[in-house]
Structures are given as structure tokens and as C-alpha cells.
């Protein structure tokens, strides 16, 4: 009988491990975000994170059916100033989102990942500003070489070196893929969305 005890223990351990991995896999595949429209239809609410997002990217306006106008493309400091100005104008605490908050909007379960056009109509894709600052280095998301993107974004802006210090770099999220980068030059002109805590108002 002692000959079979290690084998049975191993089989039991493997079965427990398999069950644990199955539970983790199920938790990973369950939707992490629940997005719904506000009662007036002007906001998209992340009901789990209790965050409210305007349906339109900054620079565009919601007309009751879709987003119209031209999306703003500003550098990081200008985007922060825009958020402060909107906060003062509306007396609501609008701010730039953190990278993790922004990437929650990307529907990766769709055949073509990106923002749900029913919730965010006429939305531009590509890189959007996030509020995380980075002075210690390291990527928060996928490790890709963004040199070509960086060069394209900096055309006409003095050709800032890719070796610029981390002090001059900020986070951005690709709203088509959900990728996060931490090395976007803060003088780049990017689209941006604002967010605030949802208070049923």
C-alpha cells in the first residue's frame, strides 16, 4: 500500500491544481467592465468602477444622437489645462483618466477590438493621454517598440530625441488595442477623454 501513496498524493495534487486553474481561467474570461448609459444618454457609466465618461472625445459634442465636431489634439499640459477649465465651467471634477481606467473602455471581446461605437459614436482611435506620470521608467502595459509612432507624433515639433528623460514622458493608451505606453513625449499632440466619479447627476 505504501507503494501507491505517493502516486495518489500526486494525482490529488494535480487534480486540485487543475481545479484552481479552471477557476482562475473562468475569472479571467468573465467581463471585468459593465458599461451603461446614463439616464439622459449623455454619459457612459462604468458601473463597477463608478466612473462617468462623456460619450464624445474632447472637442466633439453630443447632439442627442451622435458626436459632432472635431476632436482636439493637445499636448499633455494643454490636456490637463482643458480638464481644469471644464471642471471650473461645469463645477464637476473632470480629470484625465489613469491608464488602467482608460483601457477598461476597450472591448477586447469584439471581433474588431476598440470602443463600442454604440456607446462612443464617431470616436477617434489611436493613442489617448492618461494621467499617470512616469519618472522611474518601465512600461505599464505591453512592451513594444514605439519609435516610429513617436517620430510621427513629433514631426514639426523640433524633433525631440527618443532618448529624452523620463521627466518628459507620459502615459498613453491605444483605444483600438488597449495597449499602454509610458514613453509618450509630453509635447506630442494626442486625443484625450475626461472622466469623473459617477454621482447619479
Image (cartoon, grey):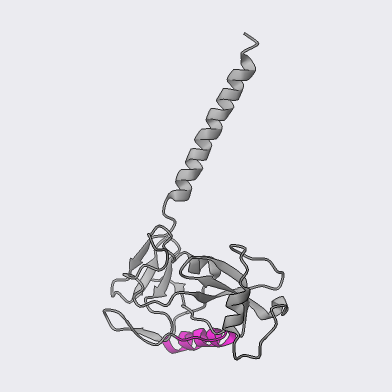
Residue 47 belongs to magenta span = no
**Magenta stretch bounds:** 72-90
How far from the left and from the top, in percent, is residue 119?
34, 70
Q: In the rendered image, which quarter is residue 107 located in?
A: bottom left
Compared across the picture, whether 148 is left or right of 104 comes to: right
What residue lies at 50% left-to-right and 43% top-to-bottom?
Answer: 24
Furthest residue toward left: 65
- Residue 165 lies left or right of residue 174; in this view the side is right
Residue at image coords 44%, 84%: 91
The quadrant of the picture occupied by the C terminus is bottom left
The answer to whether residue 88 is magenta is yes
Residue in the foreground of this view, choosing between 109 and 30: 109
Above or below: residue 100 compared with residue 187: above
Q: Residue pushed farthest top?
A: 1
Residue shown at 62%/90% (left/top)? 157
Q: Is residue 64 above or below residue 200?
A: below
> Closer to the camera, 3 or 90?
3
Q: Position of residue 165 (x, y in %)?
A: 73, 78
Can you say which quadrant of the picture contains the N terminus?
top right
Residue 5, quarter of picture:
top right
Residue name at image x 59 percent, y 86 percent? 77
| Numbered circles on residues, count | 0
Residue 200 appears in the figure: no
**Main SS, magenta residues:** helix
Image spot of residue 79 (x, y percent):
53, 84
Q: Position of residue 108 (x, y in %)?
A: 43, 60
Q: Is residue 126 visible?
A: yes
Amino acid at each position: 500500500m505504501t507503494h501507491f501513496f505517493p502516486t495518489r498524493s500526486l494525482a490529488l495534487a494535480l487534480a486540485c491544481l487543475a481545479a484552481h486553474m479552471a477557476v482562475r481561467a473562468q475569472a479571467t474570461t468573465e467581463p471585468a467592465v459593465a458599461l451603461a448609459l446614463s439616464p439622459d444618454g449623455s454619459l457612459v457609466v462604468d458601473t463597477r468602477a463608478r466612473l462617468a465618461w462623456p460619450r464624445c472625445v474632447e472637442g466633439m459634442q453630443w447632439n442627442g444622437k451622435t458626436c459632432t465636431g472635431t476632436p482636439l489634439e493637445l499636448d499633455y499640459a494643454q490636456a490637463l489645462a482643458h480638464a481644469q477649465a471644464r471642471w471650473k465651467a461645469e463645477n464637476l471634477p473632470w480629470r484625465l483618466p489613469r491608464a488602467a481606467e482608460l483601457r477598461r473602455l476597450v472591448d477586447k471581446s469584439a471581433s474588431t477590438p476598440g470602443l463600442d461605437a454604440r456607446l462612443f459614436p464617431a470616436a477617434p482611435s489611436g493613442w489617448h493621454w492618461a494621467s499617470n506620470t512616469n519618472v522611474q521608467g518601465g512600461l505599464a502595459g505591453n512592451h513594444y517598440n514605439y519609435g516610429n509612432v513617436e517620430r510621427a507624433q513629433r514631426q514639426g515639433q523640433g524633433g525631440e530625441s527618443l532618448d529624452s528623460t523620463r521627466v518628459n514622458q507620459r502615459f498613453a493608451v491605444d483605444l483600438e488595442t488597449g495597449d499602454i505606453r509610458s514613453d509618450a513625449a509630453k509635447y506630442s499632440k494626442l486625443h484625450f477623454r475626461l472622466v469623473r466619479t459617477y454621482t447619479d447627476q
